[in-house]
Amino acid sequence: MRRVPVFNGLSDAEITRIESIVESSEYIKGNFVFREGEKGDSLFVLNNGLIKLTQCNQEGKEHVIRFLFPGDYFGQFALLQNKRNEVNAEMIESGTICRLHRKHFIPLLESNAALAYNFLMSLSEQLHHAEDWAAALHMLEVDKRLAKILLYFYDKNPSKRGVTLPASKKEIAAMIGTTAETLSRKLSQLEEQKLISVSKRVVRIMDLPSLLHMAGASNGGVV
């Protein structure tokens, strides 16, 4: 199983114990790991592939909440609160997911102070990023919101050779609170300023310091 921050600092024996209770499953593009409204009883870790988390409003319109990349975990809030999932988790790139059932994971937290602390700090960081992004949607101009989301994708790309947009421009635009037409125009403006270069869905960061300055960030994490 891919190492995630929650498991940092644990001994090899503890990691081996966790791996012994992990279920690993393959999912193909278009599969749902779970759907909105289903009971949550597991913590999931994306080993490889790509996931989008979405919610549907009363009219049935889908809204992208965030994208998950290898090493990200999800399902934690429904798991801890013993509630139903509030989002859909859909594979948009085939991959492998590791699953820890509640009946196994909760006793681990109760018996391992280091794991419980790491989990708490990781949840705190997720909430901080969510609040930061919510504030950005209300306070920042479109070009700054675009810079933040590009930096987020860049931060999640280990090769740093180029950011492949994980969804259509329409979905990315909705995620940053604008239209596909405005998104295309803003991408062109950033390209003219030589901050990025764009080739179809691949965006290469050409001037990282300037893009960070535009986003008002010291790193790429935003959501």
Image (cartoon, grey):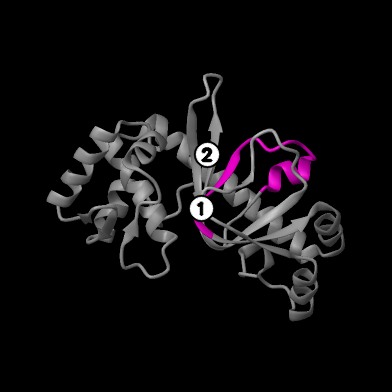
Q: Identify which residue is drawn at 28% across, 57% down.
A: 202
Residue 72 in the image, given as x and y percentages of width and height: 57, 57
Residue 85 belongs to magenta span: yes
Q: Which residue is mark 2?
A: 131
Residue 68 belongs to magenta span: no
Q: Which mark is residue 47?
A: none
Label 1 sits on a secondary structure element that is loop
Residue 200 seen anywhere in this rendered image of the structure: yes
Q: Identify which residue is drawn at 80% across, 73% down.
A: 17
Residue 135 in the figure: left or right of residue 24 = left
Amino acid beneath label 2: Glu
Front position in the image: 108 or 184:
184
Residue 223 in the figure: left or right of residue 100 = left
Please name which of the two marks, 2 or 1, marks the residue nearer to the observer.
1
Residue 77 in the image, given as x and y percentages of width and height: 70, 43
Residue 216 seen anywhere in this rendered image of the structure: no
Res 20 → quadrant = bottom right
Vertical placement of residue 152 versus 36, above or below: below
Q: Identify which residue is drawn at 75% across, 51% down.
A: 42
Q: How many marks?
A: 2
Residue 70 in the image, given as x and y percentages of width and height: 53, 62
Res 99 → quadrant = bottom right
Label 2 crowd (10 A; few <14 / some 14-19 / many >=20): some
Amino acid beneath label 1: Lys
